[in-house]
Amino acid sequence: MKNVIQAEHKKIFFLRFSRVYLLFTIGISLVAGFIFSVTTHVTQGRAITDLSVLEVVSANMLGIDLASILLIIFTGLSISREFTAETIYSSLAVCPDRKKFFMGKYITFFFLSIVLSVLLIALIYLSSQVILMINNMDAANLANTDIRQFVLGIMVMPVFYCLLTVAATIFFKSSGGGIAFSIIVIAFPALINMFSDTVQKVLLPIMPQSAIHSLSGTAAEGSFEALGTFTSIGLLLLWLVITSLIAIISFQKRDF
């Protein structure tokens, strides 16, 4: 398994495109978060000095949403490259165990998404401190329970959607299918909110967005999105386990 992971790591970072894309993701996410946080007078109709410290940090952390989407695209393109370039034949010749092959990709992108998420969260958090200082506001303190919960909860988003895309891309054998699946999962709650409370009550609690919002403390108390901590973690793990099993089973049965 160690050799498989090392091989997957080289497949990603051997290409200049991958290194440039990931650096671009970090840079554009920081810029986007900064813009969101200093334009609240336009987006929210409130001056930044009228916001709480948590609200400023929250606005800046919207850059993580963009980073998650860009990471979904990167993951889909990186994995599908083996199918489109037909290097999947040589890869499976070296590692005929398809389950191990899948897990090698899964673990590699797991660590990649964690590193990217932690780095971005740290940079955006520091950016928030600068914005707060410039506006003569109190500094964000991780000793504050609400801020700490928000920062730790939002960190889960890029990791979850990256792993979801790994499974979806393997299943569909294309970047389009993998990317579309993850984007639909992100966007579907907005569609659900257009329906009656009866439909929302059934569907919203099983969507990953509800779990992420609950973990970050942004789910309104008493709303259909509000879940317990263990329920939220269990829901996200269930999504990942089910999609991974479906991807592995279909991958093992498919002829190339």
Image (tube, rainbow, N blue to C red):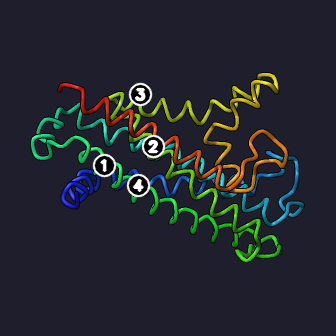
Give the mark nearer the N terminus: 2 vs 4: 4
Q: Count of labels shown?
A: 4
Q: Secondary structure at mark 3?
A: helix
Find residue 251 and report its horizontal and vertical position in percent.
28, 32
Quadrant holding the N terminus: bottom left
Question: Which residue appears at 83% of the width and 47% of the height?
Answer: 44
Residue at numbered disc 1:
103
Residue at numbered disc 4:
110
**Residue 177: assigned label:** 3
Q: How far apart are labels 1 and 4 at the CA level?
A: 10 Å
How crowded is the residue under tag 2: few (<14 C-alpha within 10 Å), some, or many (20+)?
some
The amino acid marked with disc number 1 is Met
- Most foreground residue, 192 or 26: 192
Observer-side mark, 4 or 3, equals 4
Decide: is 17 above or below 153: above
Specify the farthest residue to the top. 195
Observer-side mark, 2 or 4, equals 2
Decide: is 12 above or below 199: below
The amino acid marked with disc number 2 is Val
